[in-house]
Every structure is written in C-alpha cells, then in structure tokens.
Image (tube, grey):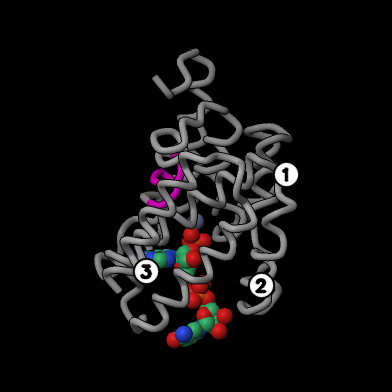
Amino acid sequence: MNLPTSPTATAALLEALHFAATKHRDQRRKDTEVSPYINHPIRVAQLLASEGGVTDLVTLQGAILHDTVEDTETTPEELERHFGAAVRRVVAEVTDDKSLPKGDRKRLQIEHAPHLSPQAQQIKIADKTANVQDVTASPPTDWSLERRREYLDWTEQVVAGCRGCNPSLEAFYDGLLAQGRKLL
Ligand code: NDP
Ligand code: ZN
C-alpha cells in the first residue's frame, strides 16, 4: 500500500488537500470543460503515489500545494505555519517567479531543474506528466496544434534535468509523452 498509514500522516495529507481546495476554490483549468483547479494538484499527488511509489509525506503535501503560492494569495510563511519548513521549501522550489516574463520563466525551469532537491524534482516530473496528459487530451481551448507540440517539447527539456530521481515515474512520463506525440 502506497498511502501513508499512520493516522497523523493521513490527517496531514488531508489537511493539505483541504487547504489547497480552499485556496483554489474559485479557479478553473484552461480546458474546454473548465475543470475545477484542484483536480490538477490532486492528479499530481496521485501520479507520485501510484506511478512513482512515493510515500514521503512532504513530497505528497508539496504536490497538493505546488500551485498555491504561484496561483493564489498563499504566502510561503502561511505554508510554513500550517505544514512546516520542509513543505514551504519544496513548494518554493517548484514556484516560478511571476515577476518575470513568461519566456524567461520557461527557460529558468529548464535551467533550475538539475539543481532542485529530489523531492522537488519528483513533483516537477509529476506536474509535467499531468500537463502532458492535459495538453494531449484536454488542452487549453485556444491552443494550436503547434503550440501543443511545443509545450510537449518544453516539458521534455524540464524533465531531462530531473532524471534519476524516480525511474518508474520517469518511465510513465515517457510513455505519455510518446503517446501525446503520436496523437498530435
Ligand atoms: P501558459 O503557461 O500560459 O499555459 C500553460 C500552463 O497552464 C501549464 O503549464 C499549466 O500550468 C496550466 N494549465 C491550465 N490548464 C491547462 C490545461 N488544460 N492543459 C495544460 N496546461 C494547463 O502557456 P505556455 O506554457 O505556452 O507559456 C507561454 C509561452 O508560450 C510564452 O513563452 C510564449 O512565448 C509562448 N507562446 C506560444 C504560442 C504558440 O503558438 N507557439 C502562442 C503564444 C505564446 P500549471 O500546472 O502551473 O497550472
Ligand atoms: Zn501544476
């Protein structure tokens, strides 16, 4: 069984889920169905557990919380208060600097990937896996085929810098990327 089994760990994971769901409650993904935003962090954590065999609580909490600082009013201090310094750190590692232009942010994700902690690298791979799946099957409404293909290429460059942290998660990403390329 991959899920944390101690009552404390289970409660801590569910607290992260409750916190993220509250923070993202008015947000939607960019697909035609305008899916609830929280579906995405749930998927990222689920991929880590079920495809990556991850049981580390900080990594799973980090996955659930990975977009709270970037996309909501959540502060790093708030994360530390609720979930501790390790969760704050790992979320900070996967948070883009939103003051920078989009192109710079995308380049920096590629450059920073090899220097992330193994916990953050695994979250990155799971995040890119979820987005590859979405860009293939339920992409942002106004994206051209070319833009979707370019997005897949970019995720491959980010994931390249994270390789070695979780081979089974990486193999799952590779399979979805290949499938996406075949379909697009
Ligand atoms: P965005 O960063 O604006 O959108 C992609 C991000 O949106 C994902 O990384 C994901 O981030 C989130 N997201 C929400 N819903 C979905 C969904 N259904 N499917 C996939 N992702 C979703 O776009 P880009 O990554 O393309 O970045 C902008 C860059 O694109 C700029 O550098 C610009 O130059 C370039 N561009 C290219 C164009 C082209 O036609 N080739 C046209 C316009 C811009 P998260 O997981 O963090 O929520
Ligand atoms: Zn994400």
Mark 3 and 1 residues: CB-CB less than 8 Å, in contact?
A: no
Residue placed most toward the observer, 31 or 161: 161
- Residue at the image position 67 percent from the left and 43 percent from the top: 90
Q: Quadrant of residue 61?
A: top right
Using the rendered image of the protein, determine whether residue 22 is visible from the camera's viewpoint. no
Residue placed most toward the observer, 96 or 115: 115
Residue placed most toward the observer, 125 or 98: 125
- Residue at the image position 29 percent from the left and 65 percent from the top: 138
Specify the amino acid type for callout 3.
Lys
Query: What secondary structure is marked by label 2?
Result: helix
Query: N-terminal of the two: label 2 or label 1?
Result: 1
List x then y, in percent, for residue 23.
50, 50
Q: Quadrant of the N terminus?
A: top left
User: Looking at the image, is mark 2 or mark 1 nearer the viewer?
Assistant: 2
Q: Which residues are magenta?
A: 40-45
**Which residue in the structure is indicated by mark 1?**
77
Query: Does 43 appear in magenta?
Result: yes
- Residue at the image position 58 percent from the left and 36 percent from the top: 59
* Location of residue 166 with respect to 25 vertically, above or below: above
Query: N-terminal of the two: label 3 or label 1?
Result: 3
